Image: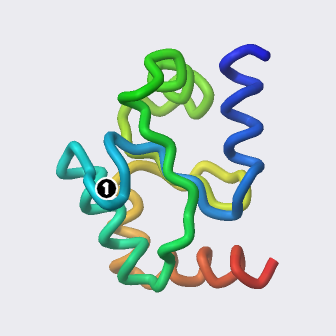
Amino acid sequence: MGVQEKIAAQIGSDAVVLYMKGQPQAPLCGFSANTVQILNACGVSDFTAIDVLSDQEVREGIKVFSSWPTIPQLYIKGEFIGGNDIVRELYEQGELQKLLQSAKAG
């Protein structure tokens, strides 16, 4: 299985998938930590977290997969939502909560 197929399988494995540096309990960058805090503030604690620092192939492959150059990257129901700035903006507008609610319902 190639890295793109592996990523597609990871994204399809759960309603909420976060590619980040480190783990939710111990993020290794401020942007990843902030995104985890936002998810937690939305009541989401049971998401799949993929540590890109532990797999260089996935770290580079996810950037190609999404056409997005930075980590973290959030996916909800297989759809790329964005990085930390976009996640924060959607949260502040109340849109992220709606997306997460639909993910729980679906």
Please tell me in which quadrant of the rendered image residue 56 appears: top left
The residue drawn where x is 20% and y is 44% is: 29
Nearest the eye: 65 or 3: 3
With 47 as the anchor, is 84 left or right in this view?
Answer: left
Q: How many other residues sit within 10 Å of disc 1, few (<14), some (14-19) or many (≥20)?
A: few
Q: Which residue is mark 1?
A: 85
Nearest the eye: 72 or 13: 13
- Above or below 84: residue 11: above
- Above or below 24: residue 44: below
Residue 79 image offset from top left, x and y in percent: 68, 53
The residue drawn where x is 50% and y is 43% is: 50
What element does badge 1 sit on?
Answer: helix
- Above or below 15: residue 60: above
Give the quadrant of the C terminus: bottom right
The residue drawn where x is 53% and y is 24% is: 58
Residue 99 image offset from top left, x and y in percent: 61, 75
Residue 72 image offset from top left, x and y in percent: 38, 45
The residue drawn where x is 30% and y is 70% is: 37
